[in-house]
Image: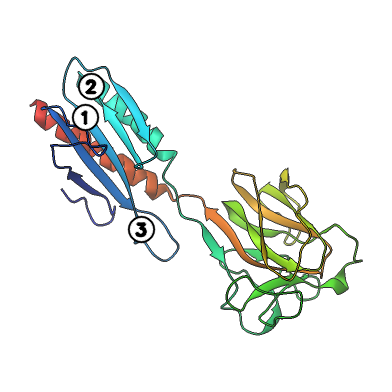
Amino acid sequence: MRWPSDTGCNFSPVPPLLRPDGTRRWQNEVTFVVSHPRNEGATRDTYAAILITIKMSRHTIPAIASDPSIGHNSFTGLNTMKSTFAKAITALAVSMSTVGANAAVLNFDNLPGFNFFTSNYNGFSFGDNSIQTNPWFWTNTTTVNYIPSSGTGMVATDFSLYTGAPFEATQPIYNPIPFQFQGAFFSGSTDQIRYRLYTGTQTSPGSLAGLTLVFTSPDSAALSAAPTFVASTYVGFVTAVVIVGRQGFYAMDDFTFTPIPEPSTYGMLLAGLVAVGAVVRRRRG
């Protein structure tokens, strides 16, 4: 069965002899795969599959099991249509915990030459987008201690706008759409950096107005000319990242984050579960 193309949801039965773990199926057991494309920016070519197994026996104890080694959720048991849909909703909740968008990377390679940020880049504002007051700039010129981790582009802050203190906060890197921040690559002198992560809606460009601090990372190891990934251990969604360090003495590249999943992702999962319920109804009829 193929669902309408606007949902991108594919619903198909699995051959009945064996389960994905190699064990033999019950005679009256059927498994369906509901697959849908994940959001990866401009591409939608990676598919996530949720495997749902329904045993039509009245004597099987309903249970839900997740096997991360093969990446599927099994939905087992059901002796009435009411419990079918109750357990289907539970299966949806389980699947939501494992399905999301893939990590995205800002690599700055498509920004030519050298310039200060005066407009948003891929949905992110780097500071207040004012050339007079914004310290963030991009460059594709490599120097002794400032080297991109990939490609040719990287970003840095203007040391002339800062006092050179060991730890100063730059203007926020902000996106109104929440995201999970994984970290970024840094190169530079022997100085360290740390992250401050914020939630909320920025009410004044380039400032912390309207934002709430939710996490401060430990200090990184000393930076060097070799680009090193400094990870963020915070797993929640945020809207702003502030880099704290000696401004003008580091370069950043490959800013890595995970966008919040689109509502359509969960809609496609729900559509697949409705399809399972419809098949169960037909089989019982």
Q: Residue furthest bottom?
A: 113
Give the vertical position of 276 relative to 218 (above or below): above
Place of residue 203 in the rendered image (x, y in percent of width and height, measured from the top left): 71, 54
Residue at (60, 69) in percent of width and height:
121
Structural crowding at the residue carrying mark 1, measured as other residues with C-alpha within 10 Å and reported as few (<14), some (14–19) or many (≥20): many
Q: CA distance from mark 1 to mark 2?
A: 7 Å
Residue at (72, 49) in percent of width and height:
210
Look at the numbered disc 2 and give the secondary structure of its residue.
loop
Q: Amino acid at mark 2?
A: Leu
Whichever of callouts 1 and 3 sits on the residue coming sooner in the sequence is: 3
Whichever of callouts 3 and 2 sits on the residue coming sooner in the sequence is: 3
Q: Which mark is residue 54?
A: 1
Q: Are marks 1 and 2 in contact (CB under 8 Å)?
A: yes
Place of residue 216 in the rendered image (x, y in percent of width and height, measured from the top left): 74, 46
Q: Quadrant of the C terminus?
A: top left
Residue at (88, 67) in percent of width and height:
162
Look at the numbered disc 3 and give the secondary structure of its residue.
loop
Q: Amino acid at mark 1?
A: Ile
Q: Amino acid at mark 3?
A: Thr
Whichever of callouts 1 and 2 sits on the residue coming sooner in the sequence is: 1
Q: Are marks 1 and 3 in contact (CB under 8 Å)?
A: no
**Residue 45 falls in which quadrant of the image?**
bottom left
Structural crowding at the residue carrying mark 2, measured as other residues with C-alpha within 10 Å and reported as few (<14), some (14–19) or many (≥20): many
- Residue denoted by label 2: 78
Give the vertical position of 2 relative to 155 (above or below): above
Q: Which mark is residue 46?
A: 3
Place of residue 176 in the rendered image (x, y in percent of width and height, measured from the top left): 60, 55
Look at the numbered disc 1 and give the secondary structure of its residue.
strand
Q: CA distance from mark 3 to mark 2?
A: 32 Å
Place of residue 44 in the rendered image (x, y in percent of width and height, measured from the top left): 36, 61
